[in-house]
Amino acid sequence: MQEHHTFENGLKYRPNYKWPESGTERDCPRCNEYLEIIENVKTYFGKPWWCAPCQWQFSEEDLDKIETKSKAK
């Protein structure tokens, strides 16, 4: 039987995500619904933007890439 291991402080896969300014608003590129900004706390290990309807996370970099691609079309 395999032993189960956990990391006491969790794993932050990319701790240097650029967090948006408070009050910034953006729409989801997948469903056009309002994105929520997640509070940047030590215990959160995901991306800063959350789309509740899609259940999808986005970073500032993700959204910038998507905007650049859509403007190029």
Image (tube, rainbow, N blue to C red):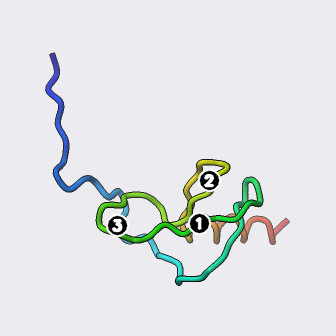
Query: Is 2 positioned to the left or the right of 43 in the image?
Result: left
Residue 35 percent location from the top left of the image: 64, 64
Quadrant of the image for the N terminus?
Answer: top left
At x 14% / y 26%, what residue is drawn? 3
- The residue singled out by tag 1 in the image is 36
| Disc assigned to residue 52 | 2
Quadrant assignment, res 5: top left
Specify the amino acid type for callout 2: Ala
Foreground of the two, 53 or 19? 53
Q: CA distance from mark 1 to mark 3?
A: 19 Å
Q: Are marks 2 and 1 in contact (CB under 8 Å)?
A: yes
Above or below residue 33? Residue 20 is below
Q: Could you tell which of marks 3 and 2 lies nearer the N-terminus?
A: 3
Horizontal and vertical percent for residue 45? Answer: 37, 58
In the picture, measured across the screen, residue 2 lies left or right of residue 24, that is left
Q: Amino acid at mark 1?
A: Glu
Residue under pointer 3: 15
